[in-house]
Amino acid sequence: MSKISLLVISIANPILIGVYKEGNLKETIKGYGKTSDVLPKIIDELLKKMSIGELIYVNGPGSYMSIKLAYIFLKTLSITLNIPFLALSGFDVNNNSPIKALGKKYFFLDENNEIKMRFLDDDEIVNDFVLPLVINYEKCFSDTLPNYQLPAV
């Protein structure tokens, strides 16, 4: 039986879920609405149709609440189904473009690959998040804790 992996991008709307067979994208699912409403419904429908062998999610930076909800839901699923759970940076699924942060600020990768937050320059482009056609496991990591990148209050 071939391995089915799910890749979840919940840090922006619409939520994107990729169904991968042996690492290759086979189906794209878009969910509109709150992560807490959309993610469980989509995953429930998928579990009724297939056996999931791996979960991957974008752990940030991005929407604090969405990251937290996706992490708790997918980590619980990983434990109860006894399947691997991996994480991926949001910058790896939007061509390293700025990611919406707080207010009018965005997260950026600087020249040292450190995440910084600032306003957009007039000439900067924000790319949409895209499910990769093939999962690049070299960019995935096993430390799935959320990467909130919250500034000090």
Image (spheres, rainbow, N blue to C red):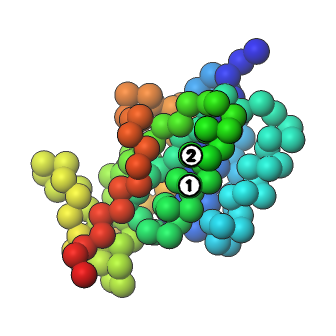
User: x, y percentage for residue 152?
Assistant: 22, 76
Please say if the residues under marks 1 and 2 sit with CB atoms less than 8 Å apart: yes
> In the picture provided, is 134 more to the left or to the right than 30?
left
Given the image, on which type of amino acid does mark 2 rest?
Lys
Given the image, on which type of amino acid does mark 1 rest?
Ile
In this picture, is 78 found above or below 72?
A: above
| Disc 1 secondary structure class | helix
> In the picture provided, is 19 more to the left or to the right than 137?
right
Residue matched to label 1:
72
Q: Which mark is residue 75?
A: 2
In this picture, is 37 found above or below 112?
A: below
Residue in the foreground of this view, choosing between 67 and 4:
67
Residue 14 visible to the viewer:
no
Res. 40 image quadrant: bottom right
Task: Tell me how far mark 1 sits from mark 2, CA to CA.
Answer: 5 Å
Residue lying farthest to the top in this orientation = 1
Number of numbered labels in the structure image? 2
Residue 89 visible to the viewer:
yes
Residue in the foreground of this view, choosing between 51 and 31:
51
In this picture, is 60 found above or below 153?
A: above
Res. 4 image quadrant: top right
User: x, y percentage for residue 11?
Assistant: 50, 62
